[in-house]
Image (cartoon, helix red, strand yellow):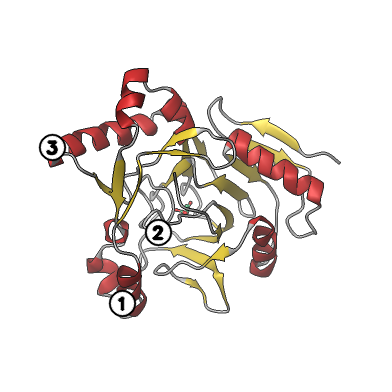
């Protein structure tokens, strides 16, 4: 059966029917999903009851898997990042971010599975950085050409939390050493589609390189606000066993932290990407 893609908003997202994450992925469906990611940037799948091993196996169809250097992972399967948030382990992804841009080669994409949800709340928003780029005026697009910005791991993983907790200190120290601040283009080009996308986010971007702090602060605050305008976003209200699969090169996301003291558990498998240009 051919996959069916149902668009969510004009800018971003589709719900996909006709696939079973627990089964083998045919090459036809794999190609359809890759094309779907290019077209819609995030895909959602309902009623996918999968084990962590099945999630890893499915994600590995799309590339090598990334192991997060700081955030908790499943001890027996480190390719699964464990986002288990509650009153004693507070959410920290309630800011707009593109995953792991502190790396010289940020992930290509990620597959997120909802395992346990609060009675209400805990939604996630995604924004299309291509739609945001397309909506800029031509003179501003020209001004952004050639600019780079610095991304820093400690911006989203502050030493006061991750470096102070004995449970994460060693991995945090190693990650800070392994990932010094890195520059990426402010506008990146998708390596396959050639689409251009704004590539800064409040989660990891500290400043635009080579301009004054005042200019950088003003330009970044404009770009952060512009790229998350409601017109370029969707908001997903999760059900247990929903899965989201996004193209991390051209999107950013925000996990709403409105459910404490209730608990929310998500499993993320992240696919290695390449150097932005
Ligand atoms: C993430 O920030 O990668 C996960 C988003 C979520 O927990 O909804």
Identify the mark nearer the N-term, 2 or 1. 2
| Residue at numbered disc 1 | 169
- Residue at the image position 51 percent from the left and 52 percent from the top: 119
Task: Check if mark 1's residue and mark 3's residue have beta carbons within 8 Å.
Answer: no
* Residue 22 falls left or right of residue 184: right
Between residue 94 and residue 61, name the one nearer to us.
61
Q: At which x and y percent is residue 134?
A: 45, 24
| Label 1 packing within 10 angstroms: few (<14), some (14-19), many (20+) | some
Identify the mark nearer the N-term, 2 or 3. 2
Q: At which x and y percent is residue 109?
A: 55, 51
Q: At which x and y percent is residue 47?
A: 70, 51
Q: Quadrant of the C terminus?
A: top left
| Residue at numbered disc 2 | 103
Disc 3 Cβ-to-ligand 1 distance below 8 Å: no
- Residue at the image position 78 percent from the left and 55 percent from the top: 25
| Residue at numbered disc 3 | 214
Q: Is residue 263 above or below residue 135?
A: below
- Residue at the image position 78 percent from the left and 39 percent from the top: 3
| Label 3 packing within 10 angstroms: few (<14), some (14-19), many (20+) | few
């Amino acid at each position: 059966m051919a996959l069916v893609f149902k668009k969510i908003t004009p800018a971003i997202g589709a719900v996909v029917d006709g696939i079973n994450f627990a089964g083998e992925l045919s090459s036809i469906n794999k190609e359809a999903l890759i094309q779907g990611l290019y077209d819609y940037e995030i895909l959602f799948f309902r009623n996918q009851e999968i084990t962590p091993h099945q999630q890893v196996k499915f994600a590995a169809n799309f590339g090598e898997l990334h192991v997060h250097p700081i955030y908790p992972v499943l001890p027996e399967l480190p390719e699964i990042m464990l986002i288990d948030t509650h009153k004693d382990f507070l959410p920290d992804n309630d800011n707009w971010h593109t995953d792991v841009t502190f790396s010289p080669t940020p992930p290509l994409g990620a597959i997120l599975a909802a395992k346990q949800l609060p009675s209400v709340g805990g939604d996630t928003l995604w924004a299309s950085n291509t739609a945001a780029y397309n909506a800029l005026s031509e003179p501003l697009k020209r001004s952004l050409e050639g600019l780079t910005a610095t991304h820093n791991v400690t911006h989203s993983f502050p030493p006061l939390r991750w470096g102070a907790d004995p449970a994460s200190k060693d991995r945090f120290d190693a990650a800070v050493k392994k990932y010094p601040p890195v520059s990426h283009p402010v506008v990146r080009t998708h390596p396959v589609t050639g689409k251009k996308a704004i590539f800064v986010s409040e989660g990891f971007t500290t400043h635009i390189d080579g301009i004054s702090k005042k200019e950088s602060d003003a330009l970044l605050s404009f770009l952060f606000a512009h790229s998350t305008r409601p017109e370029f976003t969707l908001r997903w209200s999760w059900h247990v066993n929903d899965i989201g699969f996004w193209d991390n090169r051209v999107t950013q996301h925000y996990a709403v932290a409105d459910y404490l003291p209730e608990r929310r558990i998500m499993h993320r498998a992240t696919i290695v990407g390449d150097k932005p240009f």
